[in-house]
Amino acid sequence: MRLVLALIAGFSLACSMSAGEGGEEGEGEDEEGKGPPVDPRTLVDVAAVAPGTVGDHVVASAAVESEAQAALVPETTGVVTGIYAEEGDDVRKGQLLAVIASPQLDAAYERATAELERATADAEAAERLFAQGAIARTELETAQRALAAARTAHQEASQTRGFTRLESPIDGVVAARGIRFGETAGPTPAYTIVDPGKLRVVVALPERDLARVRVGQPATVVSAYDEAVGASGEVVRVAPVVDTQTGTVRVTVALDPGQAVLRPGQYVSVRVEVARHEGVLTVPRRAVVWEEGQSYVYTLLEGPPPGEKPEEEQEEEEEEAGWSFNFGGDEEEEEEPEVPGPYRRAHRVRVKLGFEDGVNAEIVEGVAAGEQVVTVGNQALRDDARVRLPSDPVMAKAEEGKEPGRREGG
């Protein structure tokens, strides 16, 4: 008995000393030094589970390219003496892009021209002499054969001389210029011309997806670095063979004509829709959270969890049971801030998913139509955590603690 009384006396003395020390440290501290109470609820947004349409997709990445593209490689070497098109210029088929000086080809053309003129004169003279009976037919035929050979040589020299003129083979846009004025053009592309109106993406899909991909299926092509930049397309070709080295099949997706968002060379992500479910239960895709390989959603429920009583009833039971202690002397116990509004909580539910696309996810089991699921603020939630909607009232004391014109957290 004496031991019990000594322990009680020692505990009371320690509490008194602690209260005295706390009182000295708290001298001069007013209500302004205490920050406003923090709302314990998490602000969330919700959406209803409702019937919808969800597509199944095969996803791959590749670079955009033009269906009509030409790289102009000079067929002869020479010094660039004229540049008539720059990168980004629109050009037409047959338009002159550059000129290359080639003394050898020019000399060959001049020789062929002179030989043609001489052979023509000899043939005309032979025809007059043969008509007068001055020469035999064999001499006439020899002159005519020499004229035919000269014409062939002149035509060849004319064509090779044309190698010094670089002309666009298609209508399009100059994508690249690989030559400069005054330098010697070599066996490398001098110009690259692309047709931006006919773009495509060639992707390599795994062999397992071959049976699901068909010509005519719709596709969505978006930039790999900005999902807001994209265009629609369609599967136009599926290779009939599988690459034995990679185990993939080439699938060509043509972009819609006239789109001006994506450009050749841009790296993109391609989503080919291979199936679609209509009239199934769906939720926004952002409502689904993943934990250890399992998919969950948080449903919005009213009232505390089963077995947990409201805070008012808990406080009354504690007072009746005599569990209220005050070791701070005569100071009044600080009241817990009152949380306004309805009691809402987020309940975690495991769900089984079907098809998923960029917007919605199909619910096979787990939640029913009409239930509210959390779509914003669900990444850091815990099961049965208290939440509030944007329309719910906030704590009055927290609002009073804010200075006029000052943003929260600033």
Image (cartoon, grey):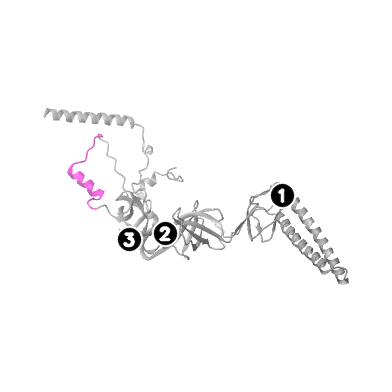
Which amino acid type is shown beneath numbered disc 1? Gly
The tag earlier along the polypeptide, 3 or 1, is 1
The tag earlier along the polypeptide, 2 or 1, is 1
Q: Is residue 385 visible?
A: yes
The residue that disc 1 covers is 78
> In this image, 229 relative to 56: left or right?
right
Residue 364 - label: 3
Q: Are marks 3 and 2 in contact (CB under 8 Å)?
A: no
Q: Is residue 325 magenta?
A: yes
Q: Secondary structure at mark 1?
A: strand
Residue 209 - label: 2
Q: Secondary structure at mark 3?
A: strand
Residue 279 - label: none
Q: Residue at x 80, y 67 (%)?
A: 141
Please state which of the two labelled residues, at mark 3 or mark 2, is closer to the viewer: 2
Q: Which residues are magenta?
A: 306-328
Which amino acid type is shown beneath numbered disc 3? Val
Q: Quadrant of residue 159?
A: bottom right
How far apart are labels 3 and 2 at the CA level? 23 Å
